[in-house]
């Protein structure tokens, strides 16, 4: 088995934030067997999909990672659908729509991949992964390879047991509802319109929502009230239409983004005594100041 490997890989263009330096070593598995082989040899290697919710240090990462972008196989049998972790949400949404299968319309506007969406129980427009997921094949170095049922995955708002157990999602299976393809397409178009009005397009490099919504409230509302839209650090600024998004104006560094996030978190805590929890991930081990900022953001 020959797994594609790249050394000193320039990652910036593959991230939706368009931020990031060189990665020491990147593996590009094409199927589940290759991914499992990598994970069995390196238990702690970080695994990423479409890098749509990840801020990578401008100074890069002196280590190894896995990118599942080439794991894009989909199987559809009647109303059951299996997708490898690297399949992009919009692609899966479009493929099942052609077959007259409903339940994944919300994925049409997500730039992320299935592995990450199952991991965090992604959702939008009244739908979420937990609604139609049957099971997921996952890997953990202590447990090994195991298929988890929907109940065993313990889905909650923007999380699942995957985070608690350190599981890597390999493949997901969904059971969908048969509907008229035109009705499904109409709902997908409506979801795209909603996203266009409420979230920045990837023409404005961003990483999606910066903070999770606290229980019973909205991160966007809290940030709006503390004047977030006026804040800028270097090349990073808060989006003018929604305060829970940070935009890379073209020359932003990861340090700019982390500094701006810390300022946003501080202002909300100072005003409301609420600590906003980051929704994005951060990868970097070369810059001490950045690591300190990230640790500070995750202190509860």
Image (cartoon, rainbow, N blue to C red):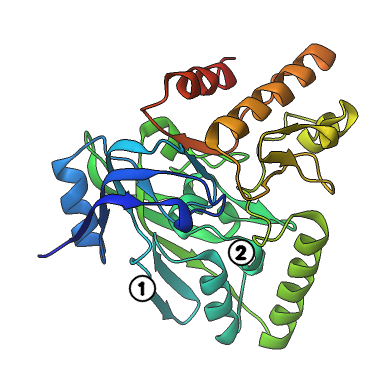
Point 85% across, 34% down: residue:
230
The picture places residue 228, in percent across and down from the top left corner, at: 82, 32
Quadrant showing the C terminus:
top right
Q: Where is residue 67 in the image (x, y as percent from the top left)?
A: 34, 54
Q: What residue is at 26 percent from the left and 65 percent from the top?
A: 31
Q: Label 1 vs label 2: CA separation? A: 17 Å
Above or below — where is 126 with respect to 76?
A: above
Residue farthest toward the left in the current orientation of the protein: 1
Which circle's residue, 1 or 2, is located before the other in the chain? Answer: 1
What residue did someone put label 1 on?
A: 73
Q: Are marks 1 and 2 in contact (CB under 8 Å)?
A: no
Q: Quadrant of the N terminus?
A: bottom left
Q: Which of 118 and 23 is in front in this view?
A: 23
Q: Residue at x 79, y 12 (%)?
A: 270
State the image quarter where residue 181 is shown: bottom right
Give residue 133's position: percent from left, percent from top.
51, 58
187 to 134, vertically: above or below: below
Q: Local crowd at mark 1 within 10 Å, few (<14), some, or many (≥20)?
A: some
Q: Is residue 103 left or right of residue 271?
A: left
Element type at mark 1: loop
Q: In this view, does 50 lie above or below 223?
A: below
- Front residue of 222/82: it is 222
Work out whether 100 lies above or below 277.
below
Tell me: 33 left or right of 12: left
Disc 2: which residue: 107
Of residues 17 and 110, which is closer to you in this image? Answer: 17
Label 2: few (<14), some (14–19) or many (≥20) C-alpha neighbours in 10 Å: many
Q: Can residue 39 be seen in this view?
A: yes
Residue 41 in which image quadrant = top left
Instruction: Determine the residue positioned at 40% across, 32% down.
Output: 284
In the drawing, does residue 227 fall left or right of residue 297? right
Q: Is residue 138 visible?
A: no
């Amino acid at each position: 088995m020959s797994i594609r490997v790249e050394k000193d890989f320039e990652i910036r263009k593959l991230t939706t934030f368009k931020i990031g330096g060189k990665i020491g070593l990147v593996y590009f598995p094409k199927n589940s067997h290759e991914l499992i082989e990598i994970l069995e040899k390196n238990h702690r290697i970080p695994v990423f999909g479409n890098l749509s919710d990840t801020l990578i240090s401008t100074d890069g990462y002196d280590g190894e990672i896995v990118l599942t972008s080439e794991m894009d196989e989909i199987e559809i049998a009647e109303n059951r659908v299996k997708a490898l972790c690297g399949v992009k949400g919009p692609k899966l949404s479009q493929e099942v729509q052609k077959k007259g299968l409903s339940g994944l319309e919300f994925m049409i506007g997500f730039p992320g991949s299935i592995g990450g969406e199952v991991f965090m129980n992604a959702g939008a427009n009244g739908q979420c992964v937990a609604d139609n997921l049957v099971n997921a094949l996952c890997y953990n170095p202590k447990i090994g390879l195991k298929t988890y049922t929907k109940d065993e995955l313990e889905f909650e708002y923007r999380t699942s047991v995957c985070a608690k157990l350190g599981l890597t999602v390999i493949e997901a299976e969904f059971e969908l509802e048969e509907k008229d393809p035109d009705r499904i397409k109409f709902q997908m178009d409506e979801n795209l319109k909603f996203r266009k009005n409420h979230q920045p397009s990837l023409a404005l490099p961003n990483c999606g929502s910066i903070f999770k919504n606290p229980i019973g409230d909205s991160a966007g509302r809290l940030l709006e009230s503390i004047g977030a839209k006026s804040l800028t650090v270097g090349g990073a600024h808060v989006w003018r239409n929604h305060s829970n998004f940070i935009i890379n104006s073209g020359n932003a560094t990861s340090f700019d983004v982390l500094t701006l996030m810390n300022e946003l978190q501080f202002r909300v805590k100072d005003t409301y005594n609420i600590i906003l929890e980051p929704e994005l991930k951060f990868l970097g081990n070369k810059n001490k100041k950045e690591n300190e900022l990230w640790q500070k953001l995750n202190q509860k």
